[in-house]
Amino acid sequence: MTESGYLASTAFRAECAEIVRTLDAAQARRTLEQGDARVAVEQCARAARAAGVLPEKLIIELKTLMRDVALPEMRTWYRSVLTDRVIVWAIEAFYGIERDGGGGDTARDEDRAVGDTTSDGTR
């Protein structure tokens, strides 16, 4: 299957639907404990790599998904933060980068980093 064929495939669309479903579930629980969402993104990224998709094409598709489909009722700022996190998960999975690099809980570190940032972007 060609790269563009995979991105248009039913399998890829199903993976995208699972990402949206898990993000919706996390939002409904009012928590960003994204275990399921992260797993869905990682599975999508690994499958894309196995299909020969270039990483930049995957990123474009995931950003489009987040912009057009995922969590439309969210504030733009929060959706952009969540989109950034989804892209990081995808890149890490695409290249086989370990989640925490042995340094602890990356998701919690990221939550603290986002929460500790002031309105002008400083800490």
Image (tube, grey):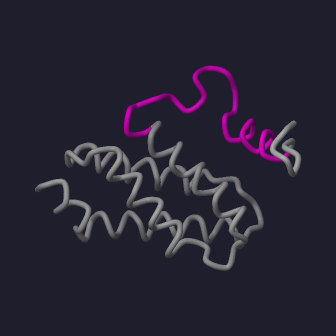
In the rendered image, residue 106 lying in the magenta stretch gets the answer: yes
Examine the rendered structure and indicate whether residue 21 appears above or below residue 77: below
Task: Name the outermost residue toward the front.
Answer: 120
Residue appearing at x 47%, y 55% in the figure: 40
Residue appearing at x 51%, y 44% in the figure: 89
Query: Residue 86, percent across and down?
Result: 54, 52
Query: Is residue 57 found left or right of 29 in the rendered image?
Result: left
Quick one: 39 or 122, which is closer to the camera?
122
Quick one: 45 or 62, which is closer to the camera?
62
Quick one: 66 or 99, which is closer to the camera?
66
Query: Residue 42, percent across and down?
Result: 44, 47
Magenta segment boundaries in residue numbering: 93-115
Task: Name the outermost residue toward the left.
Answer: 1
Residue appearing at x 18%, y 54% in the figure: 3
Image quadrant of residue 95? top left
Examine the rendered structure and indicate whether residue 106 appears above or below residue 56: above
The quadrant of the image that shows the N terminus is bottom left
Query: Residue 49, percent across and down?
Result: 28, 43
The quadrant of the image that shows the C terminus is top right
Residue appearing at x 72%, y 62% in the figure: 77
Query: Is residue 41 found left or right of 58 in the rendered image?
Result: right
Query: Residue 6, percent across and down?
Result: 21, 60
